[in-house]
Amino acid sequence: MSRLVMVVLAVVLAAGMLAPAAGAPAATPKRGGTLNATFSSDPAHFDPHRGTTAQNFVPLVYNGLVRFKTGTQVRVDEFVIEPDLAQRWEVSRDGLVYTFYLRRGVRFHDKPPVNGRELTSEDVVWSIQRMLEETPENIKRDLFSVIRSAQAVDRYTVRLTLSEPFAPLLDNLATVFASIVPKAEIDYKQVAIGTGPFMLDSFTRGSRYVYKAHPGYFERGQPYLDEIVIHILRDFATRAAALRAGRIDVVDLLPYGQALPIIREGTLAWERYQGIFSVHLRLNASRPPLDNEKVRQALSLALNRQAIAIALGGGEGVVNGPVPTGLGKWALDWRKLPYFTRDVNKARQMLREAGFPNGFTIEGVGGASPDNRRVIMEAIKAQWAQIGVTFNFRLVDTASVQRIRFQKDFTILADNFTLSSDPDSYLFLEYHSKSSGNVGNYADPEVDRLLEAQRRELDPARRLALVHQAQALIAQKGWIITTGDPIYVSLAWPYVRGFRHNNINQYLPLKNVWLDK
Amino acid sequence: MRRWHIGRWIRRHPAGAASAAVLALVLLAAAGADALSPHDPYAQDYDALMRAPGGPYLLGTDYLGRDILSRTLHGGRTSLLISGVAIAAGTVTGTVIGLLSGFYGGWLDGVVQRVVDVVQALPSIILALALMAILGPRTENVVAAIAAIVVPGLARIVRSTVLQLRERQFVEAAQALGASDGRVLRQHILPNTLAPIIVVATNALSGAILIEASLGFLGLGAQPPTPSWGNMLSEEARRYFEQAPWMALPPGLALSLTVLAVNFLGDALRDTLDPRLRRTAA
Amino acid sequence: MRPFLVRRLILGGAALLGLSLLAFGLIRVIPGDTVMAQLAESGNVSDLAAARAALGLDRPFAVQYATWLGAALRGDLGTSFWSKRPVIEDLLAALPVSVELALLAMLLAMAVALPLGAAAAARRGGTTDLLARLLSFGGLSVPHFWIATLVLLYGSIWFRWVPPLGYVSPRESLGQNLEQFAIPAAILGLHLSARSLRLVRSSLLEALQEDYIRTAWAKGLRGTRVMWGHAFRNALIPILTLLGGQFTYLLSGSVILEDIFSLSGVGRYIVEAVTHRDYPAVQGAILFTGLVVIGVNLVVDLAYAWIDPRIRYQ
């Protein structure tokens, strides 16, 4: 395609704005080709059940029982569960027993020790037991801990029994942390063997990860691409330049402000959406003066969250309550949340009432990367200064953040949430007094009650009401200071067809992609 | 040391003189940052995020609506203070180590030289990284990290100068007359090592300003929101260079100009002070 | 010559031993340990002690050091806590990138610094001198990461070009290999040439003052002959010293350029290892670079004798 045609195409696409990457609807996908994508750091291993670093490298290698629907017809902020390895499933009336009926003839990648054998219910049970193991590395256990037992009814049927009804179960099973792996001893540091559309072919740490199409993949006709290469590009400037130079075909999660010059060039197709990372500060509720609810509320009240969100996005951002706006209906409009709308005078007065007429000095700590941590701390420091609070923060490396989190050795910690399509992980995991993810020593019987009730409630409308109620109460408590997210952009060359970002499994959408060139 | 006339020196070293003038200006601007800044360098104006130069913000604003001019002035103060203090500390330490090691020789010299070998075999960025990780990310610790990087090189140079001096007749004469070690070191050896020390320290200074910038790139420099040329040039300045070059250009030009001036001055000083080159000048 | 060599080897060994001890201690002093670094997010921590014991971190420092040193002497640098691969393999994979970058940068630096430095020394105080110094100081006064940023940004806007991503070995494709090394090597080379240039200039100036050069002049030898044949040979000594010293920096201090140009060499390897508190990797990498640096310095010392026959090592 000539440059001129591409430019015209891009302009036409950009005019559509909402779905420029979708391209012409009725085109028949072409086969073959290599897609170059990028990520910022290496995974520690390819084990989906241990830690989060594999998260961005294995969604295409493994399948789950269920998955999120991806493709250009799905909006970024909607999360639709569809069958994956399970063809269909049944839920008992009391919500305690889930029976999954597996697809037949699904084959693992043809690699030792599995050598392309068929997937059976044994593999599913094995995987679920791995997800439930109580090793320190199994940090996503809380997503599945309600599963009391998993049993293979027959070769293609698996039954999960829960200890209590659990509304987020299917959403949690659709995450990469619930991937189904073969029942075999596998060295996950070096290999990844799944049933997914792509096989991990080779990798060079710090440089590139090469995936090849899985010839025996169960979805007829997919994948379209022969090969995907994920390049490790640590530097964002390199990423943007490599995209412009065509060494990279697609980039997502670029803050809008940074993408602007590339968007203006009009050469690349682009799409904008809200992230669900929700940049935030955790306040340690067991350390004075933060053990005083009034102080926390004053700190919350003193913030101009909109300005912070906009600064994060380099011009465009969105404010988040406890549940990020990107989760659609689950989120409450932040303007309705208590202590979220800035009022410096009231904040000062509350500090006075709490016994701090002259303010105080408080320490904060956060990871040096991602760098938006620094931006919010800089902004918050300036804003708290106006109510007499001196916020001293320091930025440390990842290993230090882990230590601080484990030992709960902080007053204020800039941190991240477990990304999820379900509000439970933003609520129960963070604020329930018994949750291991509760690192700020938050404890309130009413909050506990609401959080337990919402995850047990299987009626969507009633659950929605409980989730909203819980958020308002949590905002009232002022435990975690959520600010917002940038507006993100994904950019792709116009020949990349069928791409739409997914917030949970970032690279999963690549299975729909084909190259029109 | 031989006396020299300012006027003649300026004529002989126009580049050096110009550099000295530039440096004097930079130092004045950094020292007077508070008085010269039109705005509070920490004040954030959310209605003017990444505003182009002009209006109330002469050189524009950054990603949090802070005045670039004020931050460049204050950033210069931070960067020069960090580099200056680090070099001063490094020079004093390096000189003392070098003097003692060169003067006494023997096992002390052997040990010191081996330690210097070891530290020099450790890449400077790694040394800084480790020190910052151990000491914690504080602006004061950047000083320690940079000082640690320059000490071994300085110690080595001072030592070799002392080794040469120790054999010289005036030193032997002083010792023969019963002067104490301390007196010999202070009165006879130190003054004669001053020239190479000044030259090396000047060169190290330009290096230190750049190291501070590199540490800023790695997120290990002066801690935000404290402005320094290094951290003003990192992250957002690079990210938004296309849209907002004014975030990077003022601190970048200031840094380059300063380093350039320090280098030229160092060269001129070297020509002036180095006894072996003096003959050419004559 | 032989006693000198033996002495240098013993001293080099002592320095390596010291370096290994320093690396071993330093990485253990940094707060946050490898077990913490591997647990990416919140979870239960009951088994931390067991996880540490599994890595042998519960033993006394001296025992850990002795065990490691014993293995290292046999050429075994241990297994990385992070990649779970032998440290030596990971290092050897990162090494070609760093060595090629260092050598190309040095070649480039010499190609610029030698002729320009000589020209500047020959016409001291003249226009050539000033221009050469301006060029060299210019190269020293812009941080690497800025030159790199500008090249990438405007390369991609104006020419739709950036260097190929990820290391391509010269055997795979020499063209692509050079395409990706050209810019980072030029940036490092420019920086290094700036340092070398002033040294070349001043060493030549010094050499030109020596009595034997004056004699050569007096005997009526032509200027270029004196410059290249006599003065130059002597000026090489400090330049070699400088290059030897810069090798540490080039080998692993170029981490910023490695990051920006997506070349994962020894520098990035060490930084990652420190970040992950991957003790065997840090120790192995530092020992390894130390070995290279001490080896290079030895070669430099030997080169002195070859360059200047007056130097005889006792």
Image: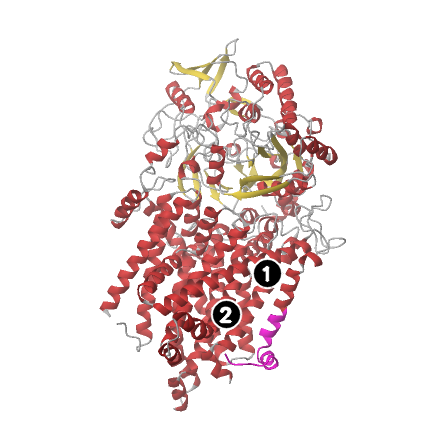
Q: Position of residue A459 (x, y in %)?
A: 60, 13
Q: Identify the residue at the far right of this view.
A: B55
Whether residue A493 is visible, yes or no, is: no
Q: Chain of mark 1?
A: B
In depth, the one of A81 and B92 nearer the eye is B92
Label 2 belongs to which residue? B198
Q: Is residue A143 above or below residue A487?
A: above
Q: Position of residue C53 (x, y in %)?
A: 33, 34
Q: Identify the residue at the far bottom of this view.
A: C219
Of the two numbered discs 1 and 2 on the same chain, state the one appearing first in sequence: 2
In depth, the one of B163 and C289 nearer the eye is B163
The kind of residue tagged 2 is Ile
Q: Chain of mark 2?
A: B
In depth, the one of A43 and A267 nearer the eye is A43
Q: Identify the residue at the far front of this view.
A: B178
Residue placed at 61% from the left, 37% from the top?
A21
Label 1 belongs to which residue? B255
Q: Position of residue C4 (x, y in %)?
A: 26, 68
Quadrant housing the C terminus of chain A: top right
Quadrant housing the N terminus of chain A: top right
Whether residue A447 is visible, yes or no, is: yes
Residue placed at 51% from the left, 57% from the top?
B211
Find out whether residue B3 is within the magenta segment.
Answer: yes
Give the magenta-colored segment's residue range.
Answer: B1-21
The kind of residue tagged 1 is Leu
Main secondary-structure element of the magenta-colored stretch: helix
